[in-house]
Image: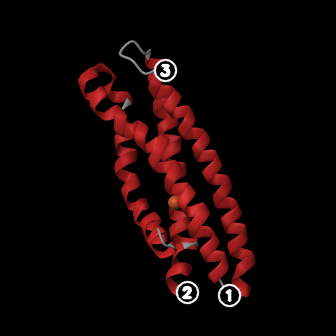
Amino acid sequence: MNGGGGIEQARQQHGEFQDYLTLLQSVPKLVTDPRSLSRELPRARGFLGRVLPRHFRQEEDIVFPAVLEQAPPELRPRLEAAVAQLRREHDLLLDQALALLDGLARLSQYASLSDLLKLNARVQAFGDALRRNSQREDEEIFPHLLQFS
Ligand SMILES: [Fe+2]
């Protein structure tokens, strides 16, 4: 994969996140419907366990180095600070994703209402944090790459 393809792919993937987040939000509500739950759960797990970690790796290995390399010297300190912050957010999001995977693995029709509400709150918090992270990348990182490429 060349750098440009990886950059464009990572940028486009932000547009797909909302579908995955909508799916994730629906999962706790499907607990009374085991057939729908077993249909949707693999995609939700795939997003948390494969799609998202791969997306972050692509940004950290291809996108962030490219933006720092291409930036004019006067912008570099600001971009370095932004990249450091985004990397920290990725680490926190991956921790949240692991906790959600654990919650989903223990999800069953016998889950208590309190467990479901907790899982629901964690899904919401994760979705908000992921949207903020992607939005910051869209505003602070990708425009520079398009400008300098
Ligand atoms: Fe991203």
Q: Residue at x 55, y 86 (%)?
A: 148
| Image spot of residue 136 (x, y percent) | 56, 65
Label 3, residues with CA under 10 Å away: few <14, some 14-19, many ≥20: some
Report how far apart the C-alphas of labels 2 and 1 lie in the structure: 9 Å
| Image spot of residue 23 (x, y percent) | 34, 41
| Image spot of residue 22 (x, y percent) | 35, 44
From the viewer's side, name the closer residue of 62 and 11. 62
Residue 108 showing in the rendered view:
yes
Q: Residue at x 42, y 36 (%)?
A: 45
The residue type indicated by label 1 comes to Pro
Label 1–label 3 contact, CB within 8 A: no
Q: Residue at x 53, y 42 (%)?
A: 125
Label 3–label 2 contact, CB within 8 A: no
Q: Secondary structure at mark 1?
A: loop
* Vertical arrangement, residue 10 with respect to residue 77, above or below: above
The residue at label 3 has a CB less than 8 Å from ligand 1 = no
Report how far apart the C-alphas of labels 1 and 3 lie in the structure: 50 Å
Q: Which mark is residue 72?
A: 1
Residue topped by disc 3: 115
* Vertical arrangement, residue 124 with respect to residue 38, above or below: below
2 or 1: tag closer to the N-terminus: 1
Residue topped by disc 2: 148
1 or 3: tag closer to the N-terminus: 1
Label 2–label 1 contact, CB within 8 A: yes
* Vertical arrangement, residue 70 with respect to residue 110, above or below: below
Residue 33 showing in the rendered view:
no
3 or 2: tag closer to the N-terminus: 3
